Image (tube, rainbow, N blue to C red):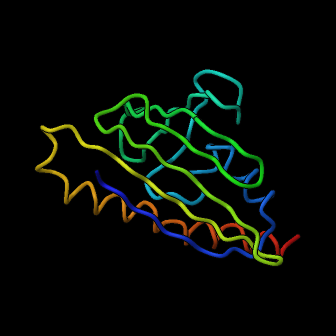
């Protein structure tokens, strides 16, 4: 199983970070290569809602739909890929530290036997994805200063 995680402390309250992360349409503002996300079924931000990311440089949506699987206000958002070659499970985990919030982004994937040869490449890609949490910090903290 491939696993990657990364964490940052963001100078924002947990609920405002949770609200921002609960709307996957915000991914385009901090995740490289994502130009947008569409809600394709369910209620936005609710457990079971299904989303389709639109990747930059592709002719249209890729087949990597994901569903929100767990939502705990101010604390946790988990999602599961429901379409695509890799069935990734991930989540954002928030904990309050004074006036700041520690945010952990974790991904795990169990590649099919046929994909075991690509495991090192998959692991590197996952490590790069979770490290983009630094971008989230740079997006959210300036908003606080401007407010």
Quarter of the image with the C terminus is bottom right
Q: Nearer the viewer, residue 77 or 137?
A: 77
Q: Is residue 44 left or right of residue 120?
A: right
Q: Position of residue 24 (x, y in %)?
A: 61, 43
Residue 50 is situated, as x and y percent measured from the top left of the image, at: 56, 28
Check the image and report above or below for 46 versus 101: above
Identity of the residue furthest to the top in this view: 41
Would residue 114 be found to the left or right of residue 70 on screen? left
Q: Residue at x 61, y 27 (%)?
A: 48
- What's the residue at 24%, 42% (across, down)? 111
Using the image as rendered, state which of residue 44 and residue 90 is in the foreground.
Answer: 90
Q: Write the residue at 39% across / 43% down.
A: 88
Residue 5 falls in image quadrant: bottom left
Query: Vertically, is 109 above or below 51?
Result: below
What residue is shown at x 81% (from left), y 78% (from top)? Answer: 98
Give percent across and percent down for residue 87: 36, 37
């Amino acid at each position: 199983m491939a696993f990657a995680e990364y964490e940052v402390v963001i100078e924002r309250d947990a609920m405002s970070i949770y609200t921002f992360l609960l709307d996957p349409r915000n991914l385009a503002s901090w995740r490289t290569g994502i130009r947008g996300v569409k809600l394709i079924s369910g209620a936005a931000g609710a457990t079971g809602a299904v989303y389709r990311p639109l990747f930059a440089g592709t002719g249209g949506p890729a087949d990597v739909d994901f569903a929100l699987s767990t939502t705990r206000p101010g604390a946790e958002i988990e999602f599961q890929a429901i379409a695509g070659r890799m069935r990734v499970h991930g989540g954002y985990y928030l904990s309050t530290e004074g006036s700041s919030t520690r945010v952990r982004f974790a991904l795990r994937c169990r590649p099919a036997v046929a994909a075991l040869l690509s495991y090192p490449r998959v692991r590197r890609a996952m490590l790069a994805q979770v490290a983009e949490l630094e971008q989230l910090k740079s997006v959210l903290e300036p908003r606080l200063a401007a407010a």
